[in-house]
Each structure stands twice: as structure tokens, then as C-alpha cells.
Amino acid sequence: MEFKIEEPPINIGADISVKSFEMIEEELQEFEKVKDYTPDQVEVISRLIHTTTCFEEVLENIYFSDNAIKKIQNLLLNKAKIIVDVNMIKVGLSDFYLKKYENEVVCYINEPFTYEMAEKNKTTRSYAAVVEAIKRHKDEPMILACGNAPTFIYAAINTLIEEKVDLSNVALLLFPVGFVNVVESKDYGRRFCDHFDVAGVIMEGRFGSSTMTVATLHAIYKLIKDYDGKEKYNGK
């Protein structure tokens, strides 16, 4: 049988992106659950679906704390440090957004002091790395973004409390994926956000990934509007 060479039906990157989001928007209408979310939340959800192709998993498991998107945008506009659990997130984030809003990405996972602290305290490197990152930047706005290591979540929350960090300057993006500690850590994160009114976006359950963490930040960056370079984002 002869093999026929073919070309992609759509072969321009921008056109592919536009078509993808058109398809997502159309398919989302089939899910009653989408009505539970605000337009800005749907923008984040659409980006997560674009990253994973998973409609039900995202719609059924995504959690937004009260005014989470607006609060996270305010942090980004105030030059928040983005503290991450793995370099995969650091590499995936857009240089354009990071430079425009002057957000430094902090990841100490491979630092020599992290290895030493983890061995000394009998923890994972992710745990040790975020403890040190929070201690160094506790007086600055920070977004704690986790896509892989659930021990990062326990370390982040415990250190924020122990160091008496101003929690109005903190947000959590929690998307670790896997089996051990994953469901429990996200539950801990949600209870922390609810109790202390901390901004949080969490993919509950086992589902998640570093790429979803990146997609969430990109969606929130993209939603920033009406900013004149002097005043905080007003949420309009």
C-alpha cells in the first residue's frame, strides 16, 4: 500500500492557537459546571484545558479562593518574587511577562545549601529550598508556585506561619501531580487559604503538573488590564 505524504491542515502557529481556543470555548458549553465560574476564572480554566486537553478534570478539581486572580495580579504588579519548586516552571515562564512586571523567579532546588539543609533536617530538597527562599524574601510580595513536589506545600505554609510573614502579600498556586502526599498537601493548602484569606489557585486531587502551574501564571498575566504603571490593578 502506498504511503501518501500529508501536510498539517493548519500550519501557522498563531492560527493553531486561535483555533484551539475557539474549540475549547465551544466544547466548554457542553459542561454545566462552567457556569460556576467567573469570566476571569474561565480564562484560566481554558488555558489549563489548552495545556492538558482535560475538560472534566480541570472543571471538577480547580479551586479559586475569594478574589484570587485579582490578588495575584496585584502581587505580580508589585514585583512579587515567584518562588517555585522546580526549574521546569522557571524555564517555562515567559521572559516577556517576567521582564515587563519585574518578577524574579526563585528556585533553590539545586543549590549546595539546599542539599546540606535537606540532609541535615531529613527532608526533601523541595522542602529545604522553599524554607530558605521564604526566609530570604519574607518582606517582599511572593507567589509560591508548586507543580511537582507536595512537600514544598507543607514547608511553604509552615515557614510562612513560623516567620510571621504578612499573608496579604502571599499567594499559592498548587498543582503537584502524583500519589504520595499529593491529595493531602493540596487539602492542607486549601485549608490554609480559607483560614487566613490567602489568595490561592489549587488543582485538587492527584491531577496537576508544572506545565499547568506555568499556564495558570500566563493566563493571569494575560488578564492584567487598566494598569498605568503607577496604580495597582483595580480588577476592572
Image (cartoon, rainbow, N blue to C red):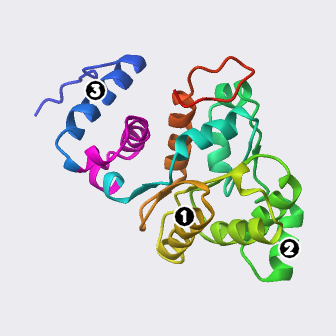
Image point (29%, 19%), residue name: 10
Which segment is the magenta one? 33-57
Image point (54%, 70%), residue name: 191
141 or 186: nearer the viewer: 141
First in sequence: mark 3 vs mark 1: 3
Amino acid type, label 1:
Asp
Q: Are marks 2 and 3 in contact (CB under 8 Å)?
A: no
Q: Position of residue 169 (x, y in %)?
A: 73, 49
Q: Which mark is residue 194?
A: 1
Question: Toward which corner of the image does residue 162 lie, by quadrant?
Answer: bottom right
Image height of 102 relative to 168, above or below? above
In the rendered image, which residue does mark 3 sit on? 22
Whole-number angstrom distance, CA of label 3 to CA of label 1: 34 Å
Please indicate, yes or no, whether residue 83 appears anywhere in the rendered image.
Answer: no
Instruction: Answer left or right for 208 relative to 20.
Output: right
Image point (28%, 26%), residue name: 22
Q: Position of residue 103 (x, y in %)?
A: 74, 36
In the rendered image, which residue does mark 2 sit on? 117
Q: Are marks 3 and 1 in contact (CB under 8 Å)?
A: no
Amino acid type, label 3:
Glu
Circle 3 packing at 10 Å, graded few (<14), some (14-19), many (20+), is few
First in sequence: mark 1 vs mark 2: 2
Instruction: Answer left or right for 67 relative to 4.
Output: right
Image point (77%, 39%), residue name: 104
Element marked by disc 3: helix
Instruction: Specify whether residue 116 is painted magenta.
Output: no
Q: Quadrant of the N terminus?
A: top left
